[in-house]
Image (cartoon, rainbow, N blue to C red):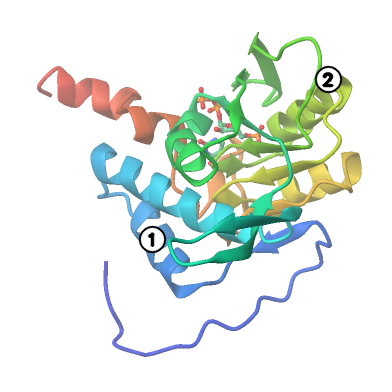
Amino acid sequence: MSDSGEHIGLAHPGHAFPNLRLSLHPLIQHKVTLLSDERTESKVFRELVRELTTLLLYEATTDLPVHKIRYHTPLEETEGIRIAARIGIVPILRAGLGMVDAAIDALPTARVWHLGMYRDELTKRPVSYYNRLPTRCEDDLVILLDPMLATGGSATDAISVLKHWGAPHIKFVGIKAAPEGVQHVLDAHPDVPIHVASLDRQLDERAYILPGLGDAGDRLFGTGEESANIHKGR
Ligand code: PRP
Ligand code: URA
């Protein structure tokens, strides 16, 4: 990592996606830079994903409905607020799992449902292999978690599943997105906001995000070819 020593302000980005909520807070941008650095090993990578999830959720939940309550401090009765929405958290396996702990710390009454999908290497299309949603959706808001939005196929399919399930409001919270993926979700689900820390440049021929951070699942869980070689002492 090189530091030019130049101090810059983070200007609001110009982008043409009405569904995209990009978080330009310096803490978020600092952490996403560390996360993307190829030298960041799994332990730190996992910590950064958790920290980023906390910060991104803070921004993604500014419009949560609340209701007023009366309660007592040790000194007197006063008025406060309680969150009025029932919230469901849905990580897309595997990489979405890295965001779950931070999400339930921030939203302790939320329930966690799981969807499993992987991208077929040839078609780049998502393949669903796990769905643990109960029969009926009883959540007012469902927050879909996945650090990566590349072609947008996984998020688009997952949102379709959640809508079919009956989710009345859905938000996607991730870390990095490619323009192609944001457009894909916008075309299919214009009502679903996408909250991410970074809108990257483009996809490569394998549909990986550039500059990106590589394979989020592998970096979170220490899997992948390179890790396997290290494990074998090569
Ligand atoms: C990654 C990522 C998303 C998906 C994004 O998962 O976590 O789920 O790819 O790509 P898309 O926008 O083109 O659909 P992957 O399929 O690698 O599975 P994994 O998390 O099990 O590694
Ligand atoms: N999934 C990842 O983990 N990384 C990418 O760049 C694209 C899809």
Q: Residue 209 placed where, x, y %?
A: 56, 47
Q: Nearer the viewer, residue 133 or 70?
A: 70
Residue 160 makes an appearance in the image: yes
Q: Residue 136 placed where, x, y %?
A: 81, 15
Residue 171 image-quadrant placement: top right
Residue 85 image-quadrant placement: top right
- Pair 2/1: label in front: 2
- Image point 35% across, 90% down: which residue? 6
**Label located before the other in sequence (2 or 1):** 1
- Image point 9% across, 22% down: which residue? 233
- Image point 45% across, 67% down: which residue? 75
Residue 201 makes an appearance in the image: no
Disc 1 target residue? 31
Disc 2 target residue? 165
Judging from the image, what secondary structure is the residue with disc 1 in? helix
Q: Amino acid at mark 2?
A: Trp
Q: Amino acid at mark 1?
A: Lys
Q: Residue 77 placed where, x, y %?
A: 58, 63
Judging from the image, what secondary structure is the residue with disc 2 in? helix
**Around disc 2, counting alpha carbons within 10 Å, would you say few (fewer than 14), some (14 to 19), or many (20 or more)?**
some
Whether residues under marks 2 and 1 lie with C-beta atoms below 8 angstroms apart, the answer is no
Tally the marks: 2
Quadrant in which ligand 1 is drawn: top right
Picture layout, residue 125 above or below residue 98 = above
